[in-house]
Image: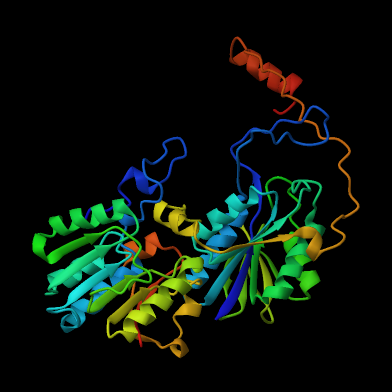
Amino acid sequence: MHLIGPSDPLYHPDPSKPSPFTDPFWAFVWPGSWGIAEHLRRNPALVQGKIVLDFAAGCGVSGIAAAQLGAKHVCFNDIDEVSVAACSMNAALNDLPEEQVGLEARDLVGAKTNAQVILAGDVCYEAELAASVMGWLREEARRGVLVLVGDPGRWSSKPHLAGELGVEEKARFPLPAALKDDNSGLVETSVFQVRP
Amino acid sequence: MSRVMVGVKRVVDYAVKVRVASDKKAVDLANVKMSMNPFCEIAVEEAVRLKEAKKASEIIAVSIGPKQAQETLRTALAMGCDRAIHITTDLRTDQELGPKGVAKLLAAVAEKESPDVVIVGKQAIDGDMGCTGSMLAAYMDVPQCTFAAKIDLDAKTVERETDAGTEVVSFPSLPAVFTADLRLNEPRYATLPNIMKAKKKKMDTIAAADLVADLTDGNTVLEVFEPAPRAAGVLVDDVDALVDKLKNEAAVI
């Protein structure tokens, strides 16, 4: 994966040397997406032979895991063009065949997708967006799509990922050290299935 | 698990050489680098470690000051706090708004948020008052553990470093107020992925006047002046001259 890590100068912001990128969120593995990838590795049948959408893909880690585990097709989607470009580069770096990979840089919230599985890592970290994203994911689940949401238990996520909302926790993993460093205060991450 | 509240203060950066304003009423704050008070960084770090040890469920960072106090709160959020409350005031937080006013404001926030653990720095490096934590504990009517060098919530003890050694003090119960001493921990630096995520965390704004009517403490700064400059030294010709000066001028040998 093409990522920014602790050995890169960009990781340690220096006001006198501004970064060429504003918030390069696509240069980090996010804990929720990492958790989905871990969950898929333990349960590859969830994506084998399926059409998968990596929604708000970031660097594309969960979609790449799905592709490696036998998904028929993975569409990497993000509203940020640079993120989709990063996904494309990371897919190439992992030797994913071109016909297995789709790229879509637009807002899919509200759309009816052709996906059988939607992977949504860290989609509740913006409090204002969380409600509309989760509402759309619930609609997709109602249409029969398997919707997996990855989240490390952020304060902004908690109201949207409660069991009484039909969001069921399927797995929980301790974060590896590098992800803890990238996410001060967080030590574990969960994978939820959105029930119809 | 506990709810934790931390107070953070924006102060003149510890490395800045301060200048006195021309009216000699205050330190000149124009174009001066400001940062989080170092003892507040330690307070935040302790709160984040409690959360990472699963002893805290939520950390609320609170700061009082002008709009720029939000930058300090963003730093606290990047260090791992969950959300922030900015209490706005135009009063200068290095001298016009004293520890009593700050303690009243933090107590008003604590009443709304009901934290089990409140951590503040033992002092701010601008006013050097060192009593906000104690006053806050009094207003909240809860135990206080000041100058903590180690906090153990399970054993309900803190360690305090004194001239004679380290004392272990037990406190009766939570909620309690803790003030952070220098050796409580070594605060982490905010890195890019954390700074980025902190931008999206929730920050509420409340006007100080809506929380507390009277913020004054009756004190007024009459004059601020710089310490007298040290007199220049002299070069002596040889050891005999040095010994002579030490003996006869300084009278130290």
Q: Taking the image as drawn, is residue B243 in sight?
A: yes
Q: Quick check: B128 above or below B117?
A: above
**Image point 71% across, 74% down: which residue?**
B112
B236 sits left or right of A75 in the view: right
Q: Is residue B185 left or right of residue A142?
A: right
Choose top left, top right, bottom left or bottom right for residue A37.
bottom left
Location of the N terminus of chain B (image quadrant): bottom right
Q: In this image, B33 relative to B210: left or right?
A: left
In this orientation, which residue lies closer to the viewer: B37 or B181? Answer: B37
Residue B167 horizontal/vertical position (percent)? 64, 68
Number of labels in the image equals 0
Give the answer, above or below, for where B209 lies relative to B242.
below
Residue B72 pos. (x, y %)? 59, 52
The part of the image, by quadrant, that contains residue B151 is bottom right
Task: Judge whether B170 appears above or below B146 on screen.
Answer: below
Residue A127 rendering spot, x and y as whole percentages = 50, 68
- Along the viewing direction, whichever of A2 and B234 lies nearer the viewer: A2
**Which residue ends up furthest to the right in the rendered image?**
B218
Q: Is any part of residue B165 visible from this angle?
A: no
> Which quarter of the figure has residue B23?
top right
> Taking B132 as reference, is A166 above or below it?
below
| Image quarter of the C terminus of chain B | top right
Which residue appears farthest toward the top when viewing the image? Answer: B237
Please give the name of the residue rendered at 18% of the width and 72% of the height, measured from the top-left corner. A66
Horizontal and vertical percent for residue B4? 60, 72
Query: What scheme was used to colour the molecule?
Result: rainbow
